[in-house]
Amino acid sequence: MNDATVIEKLPFRAGDSRARELDELRARARKAPVDAAVAAALAQAYFDTAQARGDPRYIGYADAVVSPFEQQMSADLLVIRGMLRQYRHHFDDALGDFAAAFAQDPERAGAHAWRGAIYLVVAQYEKARKECVALRELQRPVLQGGCNALVQAYTGQLSSAYATLQKTLALARYDDQRLWLLTRLGEVSAWLGQNARAERHYRDALALGRDDGYLLAAWADFLLDNKRPVEVVKLLAGWEASDPLLLRLTEAETLLQVPAAKAHVQALDDRFAAARLRGDTTHRAEEARFQLHLRKNAVLAVQLAAENYKVQKEPRDLRVLLEAALAARDPDAAKPARDWLQSTGFEDTRVRTLAAKTLQLTPAASKPVVKP
Amino acid sequence: MMRQLAIFWVLLFCQMTAWAHKASDSYLVVDVKGSAITAQWDIALRDIDFALGLDRDGNAEITWGELRARQNDLAAWALSRFELTRNGTCLLQFTGLQVDEHTDGGYAVLHLKGVCPGSTGALGLEYRLLFDMDSLHRGLLRLTLDDATHTTVLSPTSGVLWFGTAQASRWEQFIQYLVEGIWHIWIGFDHILFLLSLLLPAVLVLQMRRWQGATSFGMAFREVLWVVTSFTAAHSITLSLSALGLVSLPSRLVETAIALSVVLAAANNLSPVVERRRWLVAFGFGLIHGFGFASVLAELGLPADAFVLSLLGFNVGVELGQMAIVAGFFPVAFLLRNTRFYLSGVFVLGSWLTMLVAMIWLLERAFDLNLFPA
């Protein structure tokens, strides 16, 4: 090793526009350490960077900027703290912050949107619906449409959800809005069993030409469900840095028995181990899927999926729980998921079939206990 | 304004992309045998760059040369955020630098060596790396202490951790917070001045609108006891409530109210409004002062596993510090109570000075000014 050896690559060059923007905001924050508005701008820029790059370090930076203001939170800071808290799955605290934000500033549509999104994740649909209404009153038709469509989709009205999304798409003015709506249209179509239509929506979304982690993951899942792993490998080559995408890539490679699969399984294993070491439990849904499909450890997978389901109750959380319970021959573990299906009337046939199968299980003779 | 829609999607897709990278961790392996310490500390190069700025040429690549050029800064920065104690503070030295790869990139490997004052007893460890800049940073510690291995995750709420015999460590933790408590009343001039303003007239009685020395020691002593006890009781209540997270007030409001309490207490000496029930004043304002102590304690951090014990330790420390002040002040004040030196010098002039200083604090805190920059 000599002095010129490169030992690390940084996310930004000093001259990059985002690096310059962050530098400028940091300098302003240094000059005015008690200015809540400056702190909010810097924290928001960090949060956006975390989103754009999928890099949680910026969440920690944002949190460190916000925390000195704990005693005198402005509405902006409250919204940002709420976002940081939901990121770490502290949903109750986050809901409190958003409520406090619109107590200070009733016009804050963002706070209502966030609350709606959180209620959807924790399966409190009545409360989510109220946030959608608040968005309508603030005259945010696109936000309201997205909010309503998801409530409909999760409560047994897939066709209405589809119609709402299409209506909202007609109102959408920006590409990022269109991308999200098209992705959701793809998902809803797939749940409805209309694969050709789903594919069309996904392709329209991809044609917008923006890199989006959620879209790539949803499209890869669709391809995997339809036994098209070759396309997944092609789609996700070069996305190994993103763990959810690496997970999907590795699943495809394993199905195709590509030599790269082994190294990727090991890489995922290392990253899950590293997260566990620091007491991080926010990736249990993905880890459950990893254990189930790639490690074939159904017992551990069902434990992880059940833990995850206590916190997050979206369709993909439900699905991994059902699949893991089925593989582990554990009908009891699937009970919360069956209850959810029963109470919401969620219509995805694939998930409904899985749930029915868990009812026909005879429990395995003995249940070994495995700790992660 | 935030981009209206992005907000709503964010939650839905950040569930997926949240951990494309890992959050920041450092890996700290410490080996303590008797008084001798060897340690290896792996710190991510990205974190070092964020704290110290390694990328001199701004090309988004860190080279070995760029790291090596800053190794002394790196060592000074890291060592100022990591402390070991065994019967006193251990002396740590940076002995060598390497680099290594972890799952999420390149790390600087710092080799450390050190000696502690003692070779037995519990080992105290305090870790503060990066917490001021990245509150999600964690230190992953593996400690071998006289052949017993401990592993733990160090976070901003870890405070000082003690390893070794459980009994001793609890006790030492208690003592450590007790010392902190004493220290903070001693450097908290606003608390001391408030207390003294209430105690100055305790050795006096007001007769015909003139202050005179109290006739009996017992009476003066009872007055002091009442004032100190009610001040103590009040600030213990709010300190505990605040530490438990049950009540919280904006710190500027608290600091301003504390300054106001000193102004009023001193003014009351010069032109008495409250004369008999000073203990009530002590109690009322004591509640506010408790919030002031709480913010100090919040900065210090209470360890989750010994929360009550440490809180108690801090409280007891504050009381001990206070009692030391009273024990120093009261006998002297009582002896001098009839002298002109006490009556017009200490009492009147002292009260005026106290009021003046407290007025300045009040202005500074209420309007967020810095009248006398340090």
Image (spheres, coloured by chain):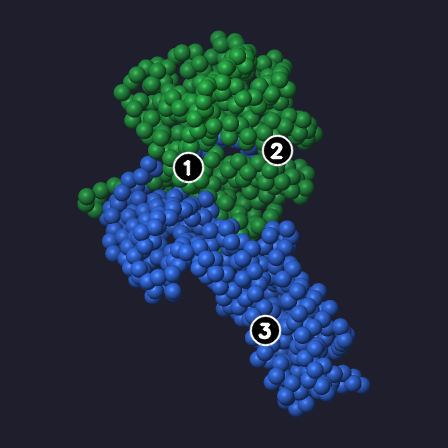
**Kind of residue at badge 1:** Arg
Q: Is residue B12 left or right of residue A244?
A: right
Instruction: Tell whether label 1 touches label 3 (CB within 8 Å).
Output: no
**SS for tag 1?**
helix
Identify residue for label 2: A115
The chain displayed blue equals B
Cα distance, mark 3 to mark 1? 48 Å
Q: Is residue A84 left or right of residue B76?
A: right
Same-chain check, marks 2 and 3? no
A293 vs B147, nearest the viewer: B147
What residue appears at the point 48 percent right and 34 percent down from the top-left corner?
A: A282
**Kind of residue at badge 2:** Arg
The chain displayed green equals A
Q: Nearer the viewer, mark 2 or mark 1?
A: 1
Residue A53 in sight here? no
Q: Is residue A222 left or right of residue A114?
A: left
Tell me where residue A1 appears, x and y as whole percent: 19, 43
Identify residue for label 3: B323
Q: Chain of mark 2?
A: A
B317 vs A174, nearest the viewer: B317
Tell me where residue B100 appears, x and y as whole percent: 27, 42
Identify residue for label 1: A276
Please say if A227 is above or below B163.
Answer: above
Q: Quadrant of the N terminus of chain B?
A: top right
Q: Nearer the viewer, mark 2 or mark 3?
A: 3
Residue A284 in sight here? yes
A113 vs A245, nearest the viewer: A245
Same-chain check, marks 2 and 1? yes
User: Which of the two discs, 2 and 1, labels the residue nearer the N terminus?
Assistant: 2
Q: Residue furthest front?
A: A365
